[in-house]
Image: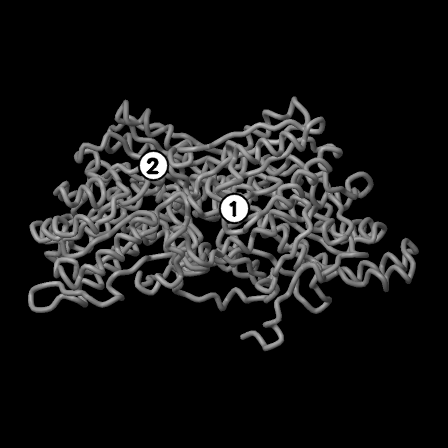
């Protein structure tokens, strides 16, 4: 509950770091995205006039001092956004675990006047930082007694502030939905699984893949969900007694269903219910002995830690880094050491030790065999993943399935988006589990009108999660001109509910169908829409399926383009992105690629702004960073076209820099879906189908389904922290129909972030941040946007 005082907006311009010194270090195992966090801390720190220091080689560097602790400039962190690992190094440090070592570290910091620490690492690193903070005043007194520092210094540097960011590919830290590096590690795993599937397919092989996660099964679980693995072993949820038989039966059943391959995923810390390890070799031997299948083991190992960070990790780490500096500026001797993290789609601060204690509770629960408790403590997102996986991976025998006699039709509408197929697969399988017959409609509303509709079964959607585009086929056509024919098809096939997976057209389509209810009883059935479009322009949802994949494509392409300029100095690239009138891709792509500017429709700009950008780039060319990157949304302005901006920059930059332009086009709609889109598509679609079942029960009267209220036509969207069903009728007031975008968009709040990191003076409303929350009180059953 915020007091009235909190309602005044809080702007970060009013927070000054003058006279403060912030040091940043990375510690523990490395993770992709750590550099993005380091870059954000450095630039935000310098931006607010604080001094910023690197501490090289983690705590070891803090103890050794000397050249390991150096003041850095804006340019020090240029070009590291796209690099995996950590450029300032990380080392396991024995000496910091001794009081002697910490005494030396305190001395090194005080000498430079550093009293603000930003630690990026796992729970061990963060626990160490907290202990250091608690001992700080004692350490200073001891240094004063030994005559190493004077009494004045003890007073001046009396308090140490600490803010943590969790960098760990395992996602094993409680209180944070996603740790920095997790999404990138999933990208590596999925790339490998996709590659292995083609060879397994050729030879009818079984592959056992071992992924990282000594104490946490997140990577194994989510990658199993994202590639539709046959079986998964994780430490939190060991298989029941006799699992060997169950697994072998399952594998041979899948083969009998014409499936040519099996994928089994094993977390390196997998155990059975007696806490005995289950190794990938053991699983392989079992399959070979019992079934005689040609079986291979692939251990992914450190590949998972490597490679370039995904768009998600870069944006996450950049948001966290900026938030960490804000937290340090606002810290007082009385605020506990905190970690900054994301809950759903919102930055939060949590007391560091509460998170650490909770994380240790999970381990304790596992050691003591309280596995259900361990899963619960991991948090709602983990629990959700597990339940969804169980729901989708095992087909119950027909005799055990309920029979509802309801028919549900599933269709894709709008432009193709990566992850649509994962959503269709989840809908089909959950629908069948609920006892419905599922009908697939080919080619959207147009195909519906033409009667292109057929029943689809469990096996038909096998292997669909990893496929890009839309296998069912999709069209932008709206239903209004086919109402008569669609109604007829619904009557003929006795369709009792509709699930539409698509973009803005899908939303318009549902509005048209619900308006037609007065005339046609056939449309008086539950209808639900799952947002899937690269543009992310559907009202009622922060994210849509396909946008993350498109963002990764843009980011990868920008990385390559930036690299192409590494030999030729002084070059500015102008890149046009998709999105219709929605600037999401341009804005977030700019944040993830480290661009200098992004032109979008939502934020009007004029010739003065363009001129300011050119001057900004001219200034930049005088530094050691001699290249620029500018993104432009395709419809941001009808007169300032990509060509116009290119020509303007070319003319104004004469003699200072030269220009190149690039239109990314349809590559943004293609490609294999990213782990986020596979998972988001799978989970949101499963939830939508469960809603349909509930609505069907509610609206079934006297032998038929009749639903004509607004709340029976809904859009399922991700809003801040929760997945919510919203009647499309209520979303009308939130929509700008002319430009096909929501009137209010959450990501516009992140716009200043991009400008700050590109060194523009800007205003940034930080009223949302600063409330310290508590871990234990996180709501039990709200589903988050974490994947």
Nearer-the-camera pick, 306 or 715? 715
Residue drawn at 30 percent across, 63 percent down: 729
Q: Nearer the viewer, mark 1 or mark 2?
A: 1
Secondary element type, mark 2: loop
Is residue 369 visible in this depiction of the protein?
A: no
Q: What label sits on residue 466 in the rendered view?
A: 2
Residue drawn at 65 percent across, 22 percent down: 567
Give the image location of residue 450, x and y in percent: 13, 42
Residue drawn at 51 percent across, 37 percent down: 641
Q: How many marks?
A: 2
Q: Which residue is mark 1?
A: 600
Q: Is residue 153 left or right of residue 281?
A: right
Q: Quadrant of the N terminus?
A: bottom right
Give the image location of residue 416, x and y in percent: 32, 39
Give the image location of residue 300, x and y in percent: 46, 33
Q: Is residue 118 left or right of residue 510?
A: right
């Amino acid at each position: 509950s915020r007091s009235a005082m909190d309602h005044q907006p809080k702007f970060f311009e009013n927070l000054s770091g003058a006279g403060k010194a912030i040091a940043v270090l990375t510690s523990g195992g490395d993770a992709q995205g750590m550099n993005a966090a380091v870059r954000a801390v450095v630039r935000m720190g310098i931006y607010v006039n604080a001094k910023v220091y690197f501490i090289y080689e983690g705590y070891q560097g803090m103890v050794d001092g000397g050249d390991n602790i150096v003041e850095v400039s804006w340019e020090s962190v240029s070009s590291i956004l796209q690099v995996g690992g950590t450029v300032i190094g990380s080392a396991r440090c024995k000496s910091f675990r001794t009081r002697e070592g910490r005494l030396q570290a305190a001395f090194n910091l005080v000498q430079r006047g550093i009293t603000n620490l930003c630690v990026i690492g796992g729970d061990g690193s963060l626990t160490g930082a907290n202990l250091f903070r608690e001992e700080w005043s004692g350490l200073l007194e001891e240094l004063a007694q030994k005559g190493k520092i004077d009494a004045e210094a003890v007073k001046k540097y009396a308090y140490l502030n600490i803010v943590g960011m969790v960098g760990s590919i395992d996602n094993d830290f409680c209180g944070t939905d996603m740790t920095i590096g997790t999404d990138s590690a999933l990208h590596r795993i999925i790339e490998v699984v996709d590659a292995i599937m083609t060879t397994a397919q050729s030879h009818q092989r079984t592959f056992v893949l071992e992924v990282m996660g000594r104490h946490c099964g997140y990577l194994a679980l989510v990658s199993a969900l994202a590639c539709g693995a046959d079986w998964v072993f994780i430490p939190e949820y060991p298989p029941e007694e006799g699992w060997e038989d169950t697994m072998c039966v399952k594998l041979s059943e899948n083969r009998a269903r014409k499936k040519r391959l099996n994928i089994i995923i094993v977390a390196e810390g997998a155990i059975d219910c007696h806490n005995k390890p289950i190794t990938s070799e053991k699983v392989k031997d079992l399959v070979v002995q019992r079934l005689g299948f040609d079986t291979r083991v692939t251990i992914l190992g450190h590949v998972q830690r490597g490679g370039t960070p995904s768009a998600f990790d870069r944006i996450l780490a950049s948001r966290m880094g900026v938030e960490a500096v804000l937290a340090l500026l606002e810290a007082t001797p009385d605020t506990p050491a905190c970690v900054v993290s994301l809950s759903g789609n919102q930055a939060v601060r949590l007391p560091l030790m509460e998170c650490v204690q909770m994380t240790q509770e999970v381990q304790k629960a596992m050691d003591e065999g309280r596995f259900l408790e361990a899963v619960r403590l991991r948090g709602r997102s983990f629990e959700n993943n597990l339940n969804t996986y169980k729901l989708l991976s095992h087909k119950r025998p027909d005799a055990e399935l309920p029979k509802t006699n309801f028919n549900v039709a599933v269709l894709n509408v709008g432009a193709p988006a990566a992850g649509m197929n994962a959503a269709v697969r989840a809908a089909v399988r959950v629908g069948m589990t609920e006892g419905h017959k599922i009908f697939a409609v080919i080619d959207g509303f147009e195909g519906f009108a033409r009667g292109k509709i057929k029943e689809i079964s469990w096996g038909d959607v096998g292997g669909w999660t990893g496929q890009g585009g839309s296998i069912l086929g999709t069209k932008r056509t709206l239903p209004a001109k086919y109402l008569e024919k669609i109604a007829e098809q619904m009557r003929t096939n006795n369709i009792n509910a509709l699930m539409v997976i698509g973009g803005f057209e899908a939303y318009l389509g549902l509005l048209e169908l619900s308006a037609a209810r007065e005339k046609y009883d056939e449309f008086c059935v539950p209808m639900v829409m799952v947002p899937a479009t690269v543009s992310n322009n559907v009202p009622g949802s922060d994210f849509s399926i396909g946008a993350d994949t498109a963002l990764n494509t843009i980011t990868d392409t920008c990385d390559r383009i930036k690299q192409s300029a590494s030999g030729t100095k002084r070059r500015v690239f102008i890149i046009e992105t998709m999105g219709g009138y929605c600037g999401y891709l341009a804005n977030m792509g700019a944040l993830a690629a480290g661009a200098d500017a992004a032109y979008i429709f939502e934020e009007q700009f004029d010739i003065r702004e363009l001129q300011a950008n050119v001057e900004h780039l001219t200034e930049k060319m005088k530094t050691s960073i001699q290249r620029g990157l500018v993104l432009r949304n395709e419809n941001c302005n009808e007169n300032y076209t990509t060509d116009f901006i290119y020509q303007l920059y070319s003319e104004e930059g004469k003699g200072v820099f030269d220009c190149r332009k690039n239109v990314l086009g349809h590559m943004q709609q293609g490609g294999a879906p990213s782990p986020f889109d596979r998972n988001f598509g799978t989970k949101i679609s499963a939830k939508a189908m469960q809603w349909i079942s509930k609505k069907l029960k509610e609206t079934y009267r006297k032998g038929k389904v009749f639903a004509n209220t607004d709340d029976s036509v809904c859009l399922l969207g991700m809003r801040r922290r929760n997945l919510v069903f919203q009647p499309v009728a209520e979303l009308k007031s939130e929509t700008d129909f002319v430009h096909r975008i929501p009137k209010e968009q959450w990501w516009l709040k992140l716009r200043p972030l991009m400008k700050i990191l590109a060194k523009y003076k800007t205003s940034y409303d930080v009223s949302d941040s600063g409330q310290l929350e508590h871990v234990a009180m996180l709501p039990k059953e709200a589903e988050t946007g974490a994947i």
